[in-house]
Amino acid sequence: MKNVVYFDLETQNLFGDVGGGHSPASLAKLKLSLGVTYSTKERAYGIWHEGTVDGLIRQLMRADLVVGHNLLGFDYHVLAPYTALDLSQIPTLDTCEDILRIRNARASLDNLAKATLGVSKIAVGTDAVKWWREGVEESLLRIAEYCCYDVKICRLLHEYGCRNGRVFCTDRWGQKAAIAVKW
């Protein structure tokens, strides 16, 4: 059985906290708060923090395919300081990059989820940083719930695209548009 691992992470810091900019050096300073994976082989979610990041990286490296939204432009850069391994060697489907390549425009995970699945994200990344800074167990559970939900949305979106050969987004004029995908 092929092991597809769906992945997302949240950070401890915002871009403004690390000098701004979206360079790999700035991204590396954002630091992992929590990461979530879903393995199709294990049929289970994993919740990871800085103390267990080695296990997270091991799971990603062993996957047949890692799927996520903006992994190449964000998540892998945040993870890079935690390992000497080259994360670019992981077989990855970055739905954000793939859709950008196909339609020459970005589409957020929330946009794709609303247009394709009829569901919305439950929070945004800045909420997760705010919860992290609260530092209480309840706040960490909120980050985990939010990140798990994003992973589930990404999994459902990917599965939909695999079955139907397309996903949908809403364009800048508010019109629903089909995007042909080969996932």
Image (cartoon, rainbow, N blue to C red):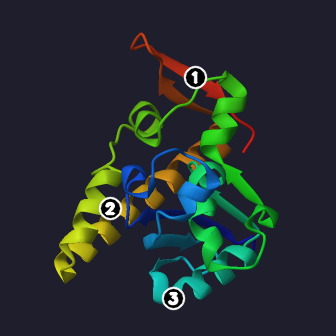
Which mark, by number, is residue 115?
none
Q: Is residue 31 above or below residue 174?
A: below
Q: Position of residue 156 (x, y in %)?
A: 50, 52
- Residue at left 35%, top 53%? 125
Q: Nearer the viewer, residue 51 or 42?
A: 51
Q: Is residue 34 above or below residue 101?
A: below
- Dot 2 falls on a residue whose secondary structure is helix
Give the amino acid at mark 1: Ala
Q: Quadrant of residue 87?
A: bottom right
Question: Where is mark 3, residue-wise?
Answer: 52
Packing grade of label 2 (10 A; few <14, some 14-19, many >=20) is many
Q: Is residue 162 above or below residue 150?
A: above
Front position among marks 2 and 3: 3
Give the amino acid at mark 3: Thr
Question: Where is mark 2, residue-wise?
Answer: 146
Work out how far the residue at label 2 is from the one at label 3, CA to CA, in angstroms: 19 Å
137 sits left or right of 116 in the view? left
24 sits left or right of 157 in the view? right
Question: Where is mark 1, residue-wise?
Answer: 178
Q: Give whichever of discs 2 and 1 has the lower sequence position.
A: 2
* Residue 163 visible in rendering: no
- Residue at left 32%, top 49%? 124
